[in-house]
Image (cartoon, helix red, strand yellow):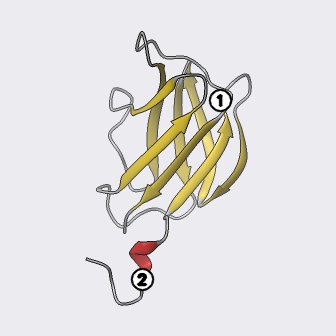
Amino acid sequence: NLSATGKNRIAGAWVSFNGTGTVAIRDSHNVSSIGDWGTGNYGLYFGTGFGNANYSYAGVCDNSRILSLNIGNTVPQTGRLDVDVRQSWTSITTDNAYVQVIVFGD
């Protein structure tokens, strides 16, 4: 159900970042910084928080890696989302040079 103003039609946040070495944002919208919690574990901090933590997210990586929610670190919050990058064939967390995440929600 889309609002009359179309606010739910645009991403609330998105980011493209380098997840190797010192993590660095390449480009973003409404992601103010990235936390590095160890190999393949990252935190995305939103510049303006969401109205609730029931937002939806998706992400992609290169080199046969997959992106997953990291609830072992923290559950999604209105101002932060933690994600893992894992090797698709072993599920072991790994750093990745190209990580992109998009978030939709109120």
Q: Residue at x 42, y 83 (%)?
A: 6
Out of 57 and 45, give the one closest to the viewer: 57
Q: Residue at x 47, y 20 (%)?
A: 86
Tell whether label 2 touches label 1 (CB within 8 Å): no
The dot on residue 78 is none
Q: Secondary structure at mark 2?
A: loop
Out of 106 and 45, give the one closest to the viewer: 106
The dot on residue 19 is 1
Point out residue 57 in the picture as x, y percentages from the top left corner.
41, 50
Location of mark 2 (residue): 6
Left or right of residue 5, residue 24 in this image: right
Residue 46 vs 41, above or below: the answer is: below
Point out residue 72 in the picture as x, y percentages from the top left corner.
34, 26
Q: CA distance from mark 1 to mark 2?
A: 33 Å
**Label 1 amino acid?**
Gly
Query: Badge 2, how many Cα within 10 Å: few under 14, some, many 20+?
Result: few
**Label 2 amino acid?**
Gly
Quadrant including the C terminus = bottom left
Q: Residue at x 43, y 73 (%)?
A: 9
